[in-house]
Image (cartoon, rainbow, N blue to C red):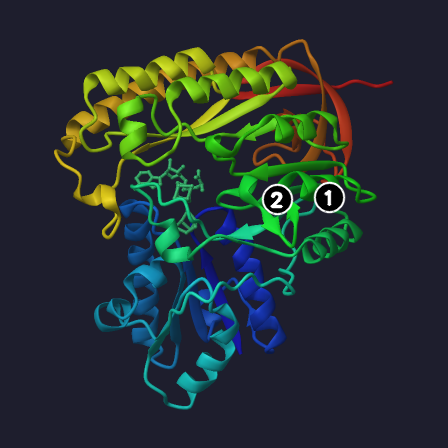
Amino acid sequence: MKFYLQVYGCQMNVYEAGIIRQILNRAGIEETENESAADVLLMITCSVRKHAEMRALGRLRMFSAQKKNDPKKIIGVLGCMAQRLGEELISEHDVDLVVGPDNYSVIPELIKKLQNGDAPGTVLSLTGECYSDIYPVAQNHATATVIAMRGCSNFCSYCIVPYVKGPERSRPLKNILLEIKQLIDKGIKEITLLGQNILAYKNDGIDFVALLRSVSEINGLKRVRFLTSHPKDLNEKVLAAIRSLPHLCPQLHLPLQSGSNRILELMNRHYTREEYLDKVTMARDLIPDLSLTTDIIVGFPTETEEDFNATLDVVAKVKFDFAYMFKFSPRPGTKAADFTPPVPPAEASRRLSELIKIQNQITLDSNRAMIGKEYELLIEAKSPRGKGSLGRTRHGKVVILDEPFTPGNLVNVMITEIRGWTPVGKIIRR
Ligand code: SAH
Ligand code: SF4
Ligand code: F3S
């Protein structure tokens, strides 16, 4: 028996796709990249914005078309959108199995039951699952992600994640360390620890800084990163750990969301623009070569021109190295979905374009500032065009090399130019 798996969503989903592969492989079901050869067509989905769901539903129509030709095929929707839409996916979209983020272990059994003639069904209990002792099927050659915590209890008013992933819980330290050691044995050099709210890691008396300390002591590991830091939980202890522990990369993903105190309050973010700016100053004082990235939402309900300008002002002050920028998308069931008045879509689009234009220039300037400087690169892949390779600096910037290198190599380069958006490096021979 063979399965095909389409992956949508955040890095958590990319990681959890590896868990699903492991669970299916253990049950003797093999992966295929050829949809028409698959007995089971699966997708792991995202609900964070409407657009993410529309894409998945579009793909689902293609799965259904395949099933028309071959009615024995089984269609499964997994993950966050499965959790949110549930039964509706069976009644309206012809899906056979609908499995939430905490229930991946039951997939093989459900497939067997469906093949024995059982009716389509959902498994959507939020059990607090951590998949602690299931290690995902290998990801890349040089870098890997490892889940440290799952779920979220912050309830930012716009966000669906706490509803579809359940409350926040942390994975035991020993499983995290064992997984990282196994990855290093396979040649992995860099680990990104994942959690929706990773600074709140807490398991059996071990907090986030203690976790970082243990991870940084693992033999053979060259680089450690983590995602995502909530500004309210960022403190001097964490920053001192990044600065002093071996292998910790000088990089923080610190979602701003808005620069207006009134909007931040409505978003239930628990910090003000002043507190955010103070933490950025503290971070840059402690870690001088720090790279800062962020997420920003524009067009949140009631956002005025003045609120939007406050966001632009923080963007201009901080000069993020990179930002993910979104138009507010109302998610049914979240508080903000009922906030009024909404920002008219055309106005929200205008604000988003303006923000993107400003941030793009800042990102370009930050890339240009790399010219003439030396960096250590971890080679991650072949370059998509040409015979060169792609590597990443310790502070998280992708660099193009015109020479071919094997993923996993560490090389020293000097940045010579910017090609399009991307810095280009030349090897420094010592
Ligand atoms: N836990 C992480 C990831 C959340 S989802 C965090 O707190 O950053 C990633 C980003 O999607 C969020 O930071 C936010 O900027 C954006 N986002 C979440 N819900 C959204 C919504 N309803 N509309 C638009 N953007 C949203
Ligand atoms: Fe969503 Fe906020 Fe939790 Fe991030 S911290 S997952 S934005 S509720
Ligand atoms: Fe990730 Fe989307 Fe779920 S952002 S946690 S896949 S809602």
386 vs 219: above or below: above
| Tag 2 and tag 1, C-beta contact below 8 Å | yes
66 vs 137: above or below: below
Cβ at disc 1 under 8 Å from ligand 1? no
Q: Which residue is mark 1?
A: 215
Q: Residue at x 61, y 20 (%)?
A: 290
Judge left or right: residue 76 versus residue 351. Answer: right
Closer-to-camera residue (62/146): 146
Q: Going from the N terminus, do you reach mark 2 or mark 1 first?
A: 2
Cα distance between the residues tagged 2 and 1? 10 Å
The amino acid type found where label 1 is placed reads Val
366 vs 264: above or below: above
Location of residue 351 by image quarter: top left
365 vs 66: above or below: above
**Residue 110 in sight in this render:** yes
Judge left or right: residue 219 versus residue 101. Answer: right
Residue 39 x %, y %: 46, 76
Mark 2, secondary structure of its residue:
strand
Residue 294 x %, y %: 45, 28
The amino acid type found where label 2 is placed reads Leu
Q: Which residue is mark 2?
A: 193
**Residue 189 in sight in this render:** no
Q: Residue at x 38, y 69 (%)?
A: 124
Label 2 crowd (10 A; few <14 / some 14-19 / many >=20): many
Mark 1, secondary structure of its residue:
helix
Judge left or right: residue 398 versus residue 308. Answer: right
Closer-to-camera residue (54/264): 264
Residue 391 x %, y %: 66, 31
Closer-to-camera residue (229/395): 229
Q: Residue at x 52, y 62 (%)?
A: 33
